[in-house]
Amino acid sequence: MARELHLGVVGLGHRGKWNTRFICTMENIHIDIICDVYEDRMEQGKKAVLEARGKEIFGTLDYNEAINAEGVEVVGERTFRRCANLETVALPNTLTEIGPAVFQSCSKLANVTIPASVTTIGECAFDCCDSLTTVIFCGNQDQWESIAIGDYNSSLTAATFQFHN
């Protein structure tokens, strides 16, 4: 039996709109949440899923609501890249992987909370996050040091860390 994959789609510009329609054609892959800063695009994405799958899904204009949706395990490549207004992120306790370039060039990102469940942080995930000053890790220093952290994450590693169990 094939495993089911549940996704959230963030950003419904040209590429995001096409990807949403394509994903809807795939078996065992389900879109559970749609997020865009423009309400009309978010509503169009919800409508595309409803038409393709006959299923109402959650839509939001708020990136934090999208990333904290129940059951999120992976934040995929470049999901929040260049989100100029993203200042604080608290990642959900179900998260295991932060993909490559997820927060790259989020110039206002100052604070991030990372759960102890994270095992991988991709290359460039926090590259060019020049405002990043505080990382709260919901675990101890030994757990942090066991995370596989990709190259080009100096904004992350240079921040002030707080460890919380």
Image (cartoon, rainbow, N blue to C red):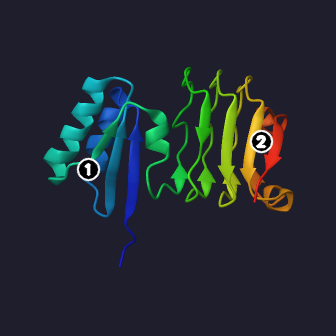
Residue at point 56%, 30% (across, down): 81
- Residue 51 relative to residue 15: left or right: left
Residue at point 26%, 48% (across, down): 57
Mark seen at residue 151? 2
Mark seen at residue 133? none
- Residue 35 relative to residue 24: left or right: right
**For the image shown, how many numbered marks are present on the structure?**
2
For badge 2, the amino acid type reads Asp
Would you identify the image quadrant in which residue 135 lies? top right
Mark pair 1, 2: CA separation: 34 Å
Give the vertical position of 57 relative to 89 (above or below).
Answer: below
Residue 33 visible in the snapshot: yes
Compare residues 159 and 29 and report the one nearer the observer: 159
Residue 102 visible in the snapshot: no
Would you identify the image quadrant in which residue 93 lies? bottom right
Q: Quadrant of the C terminus?
A: bottom right
Neighbor class of circle 1 (other Cα within 10 Å; few <14, some 14-19, many 20+) is some
**Of pointers 1 and 2, the one earlier in the residue sequence:** 1
